Amino acid sequence: MTGYMYSDRVRDLEIIKLADEGGQYLLILQCECGHTRRCYPHTLAALAGGWEVNLADVVRRMRCSKCNQKKCTARAMRETAQRGYKNH
């Protein structure tokens, strides 16, 4: 469904705690039913009670908004600038 939006050529980050990489990454959450959602770590930190929480513990608690199951997996990737964006 959203495979075109997130390339497989992008290297996934190895995130243990939400605070890793300074919180500057994007999480792709995917359920077994195929539903995909992107999320930022500051959202999960607010829900889970802080930045020092393990990502695996937070993902284990996540529930799909379509099928209501707790069978979510997470992929962490760097945010990329939009095309044409110049930082100067």
Image (cartoon, rainbow, N blue to C red):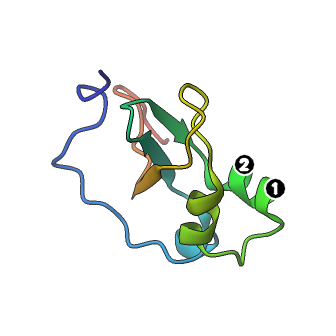
Quadrant location of the N terminus in the rendered image:
top left
Q: Few, some or many C-alpha atoms within 10 Å of disc 1 (few <14, some 14-19, many ≥20)?
A: few
17 on left or right of 44: left
All told, the count of numbered labels is: 2
Please, what secondary structure does the residue beneath circle 1 have?
Answer: helix
The x and y percentages for residue 26 are 49, 49
Between marks 1 and 2, how big is the CA–CA gap?
Answer: 5 Å
The x and y percentages for residue 5 are 31, 28
The x and y percentages for residue 80 are 39, 43
Residue that lies at the very extreme toward the top in this rendered image: 1
Residue that lies at the very extreme toward the left in this rendered image: 9
Q: Few, some or many C-alpha atoms within 10 Å of disc 2 (few <14, some 14-19, many ≥20)?
A: few
Residue at screen point 57% across, 68% down: 55
Q: Amino acid at mark 2?
A: Thr
Q: Is residue 69 above or below residue 45?
A: above
The one of 87 and 43 positioned closer to us in this rendering: 43
13 on left or right of 44: left
Q: Is residue 73 above or below residue 37?
A: below
The x and y percentages for residue 6 are 29, 36
Residue at screen point 38% across, 41% down: 32
The one of 30 and 82 positioned closer to us in this rendering: 30
The one of 43 and 58 positioned closer to us in this rendering: 58
Check contact, mark 1 vs mark 2: CB within 8 A. Answer: yes
Identify the image quadrant of residue 50.
Answer: bottom right
Please, what secondary structure does the residue beneath circle 2 have?
Answer: helix
Identify the image quadrant of residue 35.
Answer: top left
Q: Is residue 87 above or below residue 35?
A: below
Q: Which mark is residue 37?
A: none
Residue holding disc 2:
43
Residue holding disc 1:
46
Residue at screen point 43% across, 40% down: 31
